[in-house]
Amino acid sequence: MSEQVPEMQPSASQNKEAEQAAAAKQIKLSSRLFEYAMKDQWEKVMEEYTENPECHMAKITEAEDTALHLAVSGGKLEVVYSMVEVLDKQKEKEKDYVSKVLTAKNKRGNTPLHTAAVLGNAHMCHCMASKDPNLIAERNIKNETPFFYAAQFGHKDAFLCLYFCYPAENRGDLCRSRDENGDNILHAAISGEHFDLAFQIICKYPELLEAVNTYGSSPLHLLATKTNAFKSCTRLGLFDRILYRCIPVHQLKEKKYDSKDYLKRFQENGKNSRRPSVPPNYETCVQFFGMIFGVVFYGMPNSVQIRSFGGQFLSYINDKNKKSKSISTDEENPQGSSKPSQGDPSSSQRNHESNTSNGAVSGIDPKAKEESEKHRQHRFPANYATFKHFFKFLMKFLMVILGLGFQRIKKIITKKERHTWAYQVMNKLIDSASMYKYSGGKTSSGNGGMTENFPYSLSLMRTASHHQDTETGTGQDSSAENKNGKHQNITDLSQKGWNDAMVEKYLGEYHTTGSVDSKTSKHAVEMRFEKKIDSESIKLETRTPILIAASNGITEMVEKILEKFPVAIQDVDAENKNVLLLAVENRQTHTFRFLIERKKILHESVFRHWDNQGNNAMHLAAMYGHYRPWLIPGSALQMQWEIKWYKFVKNSLKKHLVVRYNKKCQTPKQIFTDTHKALVKDGSEWLTKTSESCSFIAALIATVAFATAANIPGGVSQDTGEPILRNEPAFGVFAISSLVALCFSITALVFFLAILTSRFEEKDFANSLPRKLILGLTSLFTSIAAMLISFCAGHFFELRDKLKFAAFPIYTAACLPISFFALAQLPLYFDLIWAIIKKVPQRSYKEFAS
C-alpha cells in the first residue's frame, strides 16, 4: 500500500501575506468606488457593482458607508433601483444575500433604509423595504429605526410606505418602539412640529398618548414647549393679522388608507420615475409653464385633490347603493341572518384583522365622530365645493394684487396651518389624557414614580449575532446546528458577559412588575418595568403640561386643561410654584390675564400661594431675569414696561395679597430695586447718549432758524421798513415756517436738557423720562420739517422765473440727507408712543441670549 502524503498546510506567514493582499485589494477597490461616487460617475460605479460582488459590502467612506448608502444619500433613485436589482440576482447563489447587503450599517448604525427615511424618499423606501420588511425595524446605535426617522422628519409618504410594508400583525409593536431616550413616533412627530402626521398617529394608536420617555415627558409635555405652534404666542402686524383672518385653512381629519392601493402607486411610479417623461432639453420649458400655472391657479385644487374628490364622490355613490341593497335584504331577511353570531368570536376577530391589514386609521368612538363629520361636511350642499375653492382662490389673488406677495401669503398660510393643526392635536391629547385619575397607587409621569412600557426588548440585550423576537418581546440566543445535530451557542463568552452585566445594571435601576425566573432573567424578562426613584431624582421632577404651558404662555392649553381637569390648578413644580406664579415669573401677560379674568373665579389659595423661598406673585413680578422679555427695544423702554408689569400685577392682586417678606427677608419693592440696578444703569446711559445727540441737532436747527428769520428774502423797503415780497404767497410760508422751526427747536433743546439733568431713579422711567423723550423727539421732528420748508420757500424766489418747474425736484434732493436722519429716528418715536399707550406690556417670544 502506498502511503498517503499529507497535504501541506499554509504557514502563518503565508496566511498573513494572503490577508494583507486581500486587505490591499479591498482598500484599492474602496478608493476607486469613492472617487467615482465623489465625481458623480455612477455609471462606472454600476459597472463595478455589477461585475464585482465584493463592492456590495465594501466600506468606501470614513463613516463606513457603502456604495448603496452614498447612492441613497445623493438621491440617485435610478442607481438605487439598479443596485437592488443587481443584489436580487445574487439570491440564487446565497439565499439571504439581499438582506445581508441591505442591513449593512455605517458607524452610526444606519442602514441605507435609515438614510432613505431621513430624506423622505418613499420610492427608495419601498424599493428596499419590499425586499426585506425586517429592515423597517432595524435599529442604529441610538436605537432609532427607519420608521422612527420618517416620523421624526415629518415625511408622511415615507412613513406610510414603511408602515404598510411591515407585516400587519407586527405594526403595533413597530409603532410602540422607542429610541434611546424613550421617545416613540408620537414624541418624534410632535418634537418636529409635524402635527398632521401626529394627528393620524393619535387616531390610529391612542395608547401612545400616555407614553413617557426616560425624562418623564409625555407627548403633551412636548407640545407644551412648542410656543411657535400656538396663536397666543405669535405676534403679527396689522396686515398679517388681516391676512391671517382671511385665509381659510382646512381641518385635519382621520384618513383611511388601503395598504395595497397605497403601495401600488410606489410600484408603478417607481418604475415610471426612472424614465424621464420629457426630453432633457424640454425640462426648462416644462418648469417655466409649471411656474406660470402655479401663479395663475394658485389656491385652486391640484390634480391629486381632484382625484381624491372624485374618489370620494364615487365612494359616496357606492355607499348609497350598498345602503339601498342592505335595506332590501333586511326587508327580505328580517332576522338579520347575515350578521355574525354573538357566540362566534372568530368573525369579530376576522373583521378586526381585516381592518388592521387594510390600514384603516380609526380613532375613539367612530360612530359619534362619523356623525359629527357628516354634520360638518354637509353644512353646505355638495355642488358648492367648486364655489368654495373659487372663493379661496379669489381671496389669495386679491391679496397678491394688493402687493402682499406670494411668499408673504405662503408664510401666513403655513403659520395658520401650524396653529390650527397643533390646536387639534392638543385637543386630542387632552381629551384622551388620564393624568389626574387615580391609578391604584402608581403615579403618572412627573410625580413620584414612572411606569414605562417597552414593547421591544432592549438593544442592550442583543448580541452581534442575536435577533429578537419582536412579537413576544423576548430575546433568544441564536444558535447553529452542527453536523451531529447538537446546538452550539454562537455568542462568545466575552460578548455574553458584557450583555449580562448590562442587563444586571438595568435590573438594578428597574424592578419588574411580575415574577421573573432567576435562571432566565438575564436573557428573557417581562418588558414592563417600574423605575426606581430615589430622593435625588425627585428634584428633577418633570413639570405637568399645564405648568409648562403657563411658563411658555400657551393660553389655549392652560384653558383646555382647566376646562377638562379643574383639579389641575393645584399642580406645583419642584419649587412649589403653581400656574399663576409661573405665568407671573415668565411675564406671560396673556396667561395671567386669562387666569384672573376667567368666568369661573379661582380659589383664593391660588393667588396667595408662595414657593419654597417664600415668594408670592408680587415677589416674582419684581424679579428681573437674564433676558429681555418685552417686545420693545432699548433698556429704558424695557425698564418702563417692567414697572408697568409690576404695577399691573400689584393692582390685579391687591385684594388677594398683602405685603410680606420672603425667606430672605425681602419685600417685593426691595427685590425690584436689587434686580433692576443693571437695567436702570443701561437705560440711563442710553437716554444720556440719545439726549446728547438730539440736543446737538436741536441747537444746530435753532441757530439756523434764528439766522434765517433775521435775513428776510428780498430785503425791506427803505421808506416803510416792510418786506418787499410780503405780498407773495411764498413769503408767508417762509415767515411762518422759520418761526415754527425756531420755537420747536428751542423746545426740543429744553426737553433734552431736562433728561440730561434728571436723577434717573426707578420711578422716573415709568412716566417722566419717556414723556420728556417723546415730547423732545416730536419737537425735534417738527423743527426739522419747518426748517426744510423755510429753506425751500426762501430759495423759491431765485428760481421762480427760469427754473420754476425744476424747483421741486431740486428741493426734494436737497432735503434728503436731513430727511434720512428723521426717518432713522422714526422707529424709536413709534416705539415710545407704543410703550406709553400700551397699558399691559406685550411679551416677546424671541429667544435672547442669557
Image (tube, rainbow, N blue to C red):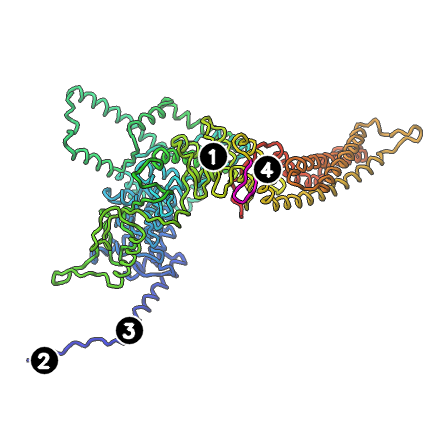
Q: CA distance from mark 2 to mark 1?
A: 94 Å
**Callout 2–callout 3 Cβ contact below 8 Å:** no
Task: Name the residue that disc number 4 marks.
Answer: 641
Q: Nearer the viewer, mark 2 or mark 1?
A: 1
Q: CA distance from mark 2 to mark 3?
A: 31 Å
- The amino acid at mark 1 is Lys
Q: Which numbered circle lies on residue 231?
A: 1
Task: Name the residue that disc number 2 marks.
Answer: 3
- The amino acid at mark 3 is Lys
Q: Quadrant of residue 165?
A: top left
**Callout 3–callout 4 Cβ contact below 8 Å:** no
Return the x and y of residue 138 as percentages of the image width and height.
Answer: 29, 51
Q: Can residue 54 be seen from the camera position used here?
A: yes
**Callout 2–callout 1 Cβ contact below 8 Å:** no
Tell me if residue 662 is in the magenta stretch.
yes
Q: Which numbered circle lies on residue 16?
A: 3
Which tag, 1 or 4, sits closer to the chain's start? 1
Residue found 25% across the figure and 58% down from its top: 465
Q: Residues within 10 Å of mark 3 (few under 14, many from 20)?
A: few
Which stretch is magenta? 659-669
Q: Residues within 10 Å of mark 4 (few under 14, many from 20)?
A: many
Q: What secondary structure characterizes most of the magenta part?
A: loop
